[in-house]
Image (spheres, helix red, strand yellow):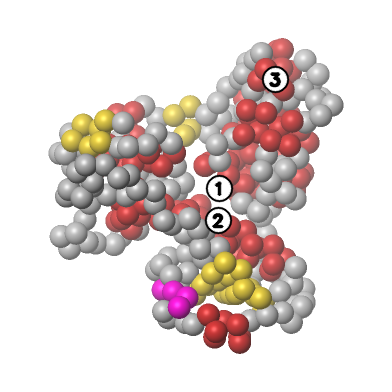
Amino acid sequence: MGDVKGFINYKRVGFKKEKVDKRLTHWNEFALPLKEQDLKDQGARCMDCGIPFCQSGCPVSNIIPDWNDLVYRENWKEAYYRLARTNNFPEFTGRICPAPCENACTLAINKDAVTIKNIEVSIIEKAFANGWVKVNPPKKRSGKKIAIVGSGPAGLACADELNKASHSVTVFEKNEVVGGLLTLGIPNFKLDKKIVNRRIKLLEEEGIIFKTNTEIGKDILLSELLEQFDAIVLAGGAEKPRDINVEGRNLNGIYFAMEYLSQQSRVNLGQTFNGNRIDAKDKNVIVIGGGDTGSDCIGTANRQGAKSVTN
């Protein structure tokens, strides 16, 4: 590590955010990037632990100490290559991941953890800006054809890995757009759809085929897929919501989170709804559930102009 006392010399600094009154006037991301010097200082806070618990705490085993140090040394290009070795889509995880790596950070025992998530998204955005993220299709194909059902984060990551392994990949999506939860579930103010579409375009240029408005069992039979492909991957996501059996559950005006959020995502994509739109404008809203999805509903209701929101 370049600065062995960085965790002593520098305090944690995270992304600043737009003021609430301003962010409520639009649907765009509201996190403000850090300056390069601030990111370098944050990279210096990494302690070069003998056992990098941040890496074991990361679901994709990102080699976090390495790219923290490379950012400190201002070697951003190598930091990107190190990040891309373990993470298919750091531009997604760097925005929406709950950052278990930071909870596992040794520094967090008695100080503020290293700002790993902010560094991660800064690396990948710098890589895109500088043209380091390049289209890299397989030089030859294996001759095997793979069908992936579902184009959410799991389906996209699976498609990326199988395509890199030289197989011919076709992704089937029942909705009208690719991306699943990334496109229709997570609001624009957390994950701008330009970011999602940028990656999808890259995957298409690398040879992955996407077929939208295609529901398995309705538009194409599973038996047909079995005839046309050598293997099938099911990545349909967890779409069934958890219901609650309480008095008044069947009253009007009660919706599951995903039908609410996906409708607003479609509105932001330019679609219109004739009389069936769920709109919180001038209404008193209650959100049951305080996780990320509940937070998304709160942010959406506030931006729609709700009279009040209670969680």
Choose mark 2 or mark 1, whichever is in front. Answer: 2
Residue 15 in the image: state x and y as whole percent. Answer: 52, 29
- SS at badge 2: helix
Question: What crowding class fits label 3: few (fewer than 14 Cα within 10 Å), some (14-19), or many (20 or more)?
Answer: some
Residue 309 in the image: state x and y as whole percent. Answer: 25, 32
- SS at badge 3: helix
The quadrant in which the N terminus is found is top right
At x 42% / y 81%, what residue is drawn?
Answer: 219
Q: Which mark is residue 92?
A: 1
Judging depth in this view, the residue of 102 and 80 nearest the camera is 102
Choose mark 3 or mark 1, whichever is in front. Answer: 3
Kindly identify the amino acid type of the residue bearing the numbered disc 1: Phe
Q: Which residues are magenta?
A: 213-217
Judging depth in this view, the residue of 73 and 62 nearest the camera is 62
Residue 198 in the image: state x and y as whole percent. Answer: 53, 58
Kindly identify the amino acid type of the residue bearing the numbered disc 2: Pro
Residue at image mark 3 = 107
Residue at image mark 2 = 153
Q: Which mark is residue 200?
A: none
Cβ atoms under marks 2 and 1 closer than 8 Å: yes
83 vs 183, left or right, is right
The quadrant in which the C terminus is found is top left
